[in-house]
Amino acid sequence: MKVAVFSTEPYDRQFLDSANFTDQHELVYFDTPTGSQNCLPRLWVRSRLRLRE
């Protein structure tokens, strides 16, 4: 499963990568923070992750 992770710090990536030690999930990191003022459109995220509807 592909998982989008937004607004992470280096220690977040280290923790998430180590928790995913079996590589069951493909973690895709984005530096862009999310929030009510800057939420990314769903289609953009889906296209970046190459997901189907």
Image (cartoon, grey):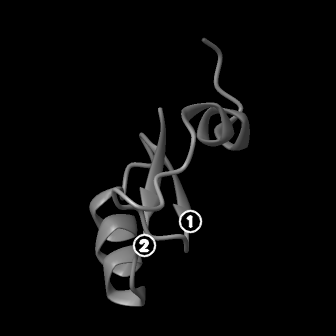
Residue occupied by mark 1: 30
* Mark 2: few/some/many CA within 10 Å (<14, 14-19, 20+): few
Direction from residue 51 to residue 28 in the image, left or right: left
Quadrant in the picture for residue 34: bottom left
* In front of the other: 53 or 3: 53
- Helix, strand or loop for disc 2: loop
Depth check: 44 or 27 in front? 44
Indicate the position of residue 43 as horizontal and vertical percent values. 64, 31
| Residue at 62%, 33% in the rendered image | 46
15 to 49, vertically: above or below: below
Task: Farthest residue to the bottom: give it.
Answer: 10
| Residue 14 image offset from top left, x and y in percent | 37, 80
9 displayed left or right of 53: left
**For residue 6, above or below residue 13:** above
Hey, which residue is sitting farthest front in the picture? 37
Instruction: Identify the amino acid type marked 2.
Output: Ser
Q: Residue at x 39, y 85 (%)?
A: 9
Q: Position of residue 13 (x, y in %)?
A: 40, 75
At a point 44% along the width and 70% down the height, the residue shown is 33
What amino acid does circle 1 point to?
Phe
Crowdedness of circle 1 by 10 Å Cα count: few (<14), some, many (20+)?
A: few
Q: CA distance from mark 1 to mark 2?
A: 6 Å
Q: Secondary structure at mark 1?
A: strand
Q: Identify which residue is drawn at 54% across, 70% down.
A: 32
Q: Are the two marked residues, 1 and 2, in contact with CB atoms closer than 8 angstroms?
A: yes
Q: Give the residue at mark 2.
A: 7
Give whichever of discs 1 and 2 has the lower sequence position: 2
Image quadrant for the C terminus? top right
Q: Residue furthest top?
A: 53
